[in-house]
Amino acid sequence: MKCSKVGEFTQGELSPYGNIQLSPSAGVLNYGQAIYEGTKAYRKENGKLLLFRPDHNALRMKLGAERMLMPSPSVDQFVNAIKQTALANKRWVPPSGKGTLYIRPLLMGSGPILGLGPAPEYTFIVYASPVGNYFKEGMAALNLYVEEEYVRAAPGGAGGVKSITNYAPVLKALSRAKSQGFSDVLYLDSVKKKYLEEASSCNVFVVKGRTISTPATNGTILEGITRKSVMEIASDQGYQVVEKAVHVDEVMDADEVFCTGTAVVVAPVGTITYQDKRVEYKTRDESVCQKLRSVLVGIQTGLIEDNKGWVTNIN
Ligand code: PMP
């Protein structure tokens, strides 16, 4: 789907996966003017497909587009494009429990612009790929490294939206951590370097007794759709859920830590390394993380009745 700087997006069309053409001076290539989303189509046991809260991806893209001075497709256009893409790729969606169809909506400044400014034309694309489960051999725990040299986002920046410009800068810290055997990096705030933000592509929760804390969304962390959903499930189960500034010492003293995101779903953290300390957390079957994960996965795959209106049946 295309759109001029001021107009509305035109009707989209389905086409086979392939390269796209862009001007060398496209806004996205030169100034990173682009926002993306990530969502999944899940297969139910009866073979039918489900989408999980696609309207929330649409709204988050709208928010991101505003921040990056771009027009965005309407919620209906966005959700319809996701549905059409999922249905067109139906045969690639793995069986229930074996994987999902990952769907990537991408909105970019595709028109040419030489001097710094918003692109004169925008393109909205949705593509998809089947993905296996994040943990190939059953659930494993993440081993995280608290990053002190690099930060992911600063106040006033674009950390609160899914701008493509947020992702290349995390690669260096991520690849360094991975080369040292960690699964991911935990970022701290850019001001005091003492408060937890998030990992490279997931939100983080800290459990102490019946209280579950997560960093407040203050413009520097992404407001994950999984995060929001897990907070609601946890409240339903009687946990006290708190959004606040979470000090790194609190993380090191927690009973449990877990991460949430479209890719990891709800994943336990096994260890966190901060400076010269390394803490091991409980990742047993009856953990808070596993309880929340089983409810979320149950809703996403149609095994648990969705009384929240979170899933959309698409065939
Ligand atoms: N934080 C970042 C930086 C991310 O890229 C993602 C993935 N979209 C998340 C958190 C988790 O968001 P969601 O639950 O919507 O996938």
Image (tube, helix red, strand yellow):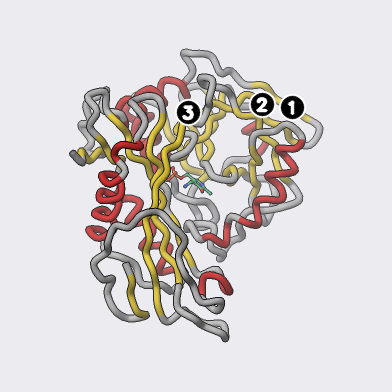
Q: Are marks 2 and 1 in contact (CB under 8 Å)?
A: yes
Frontmost of labels 3 and 1 is 1
- The image shows residue 4 at horizontal and vertical percentages of 34, 79
Disc 3 residue crowd, few under 14, some 14–19, many 20+, Cα 10 Å: some
Query: Which residue carries the number 3 mark?
Result: 211
Residue 127 vertical position relative to residue 213 in the rendered view, above or below: below
Badge count? 3
Q: Residue at x 51, y 44 (%)?
A: 244
Residue type indicated by callout 1: Arg
Toward the viewer: 76 or 20? 20
Q: Secondary structure at mark 1?
A: strand
Query: Which residue carries the number 1 mark?
Result: 278
Q: Residue at x 43, y 63 (%)?
A: 64
Compute the Cα span from label 2 to label 1.
7 Å
**Residue situated furthest bottom in the rendering:** 115
Residue type indicated by callout 3: Thr
Dot 2 or dot 1: first in sequence order is 2
Query: Which residue carries the number 2 mark?
Result: 271
Residue 91 vertical position relative to residue 7 in the rendered view, above or below: above
Dot 2 or dot 3: first in sequence order is 3
Quarter of the image for the C terminus: give it: top left
Q: Secondary structure at mark 2?
A: strand
Side (left or right) of 263 relative to 79: right
- The image shows residue 156 at horizontal and vertical percentages of 56, 65
Q: Secondary structure at mark 3?
A: strand
Q: Which quarter of the picture shows residue 249?
A: top right
Toward the viewer: 29 or 73? 29
Side (left or right) of 7 relative to 267: left
Residue type indicated by callout 2: Thr
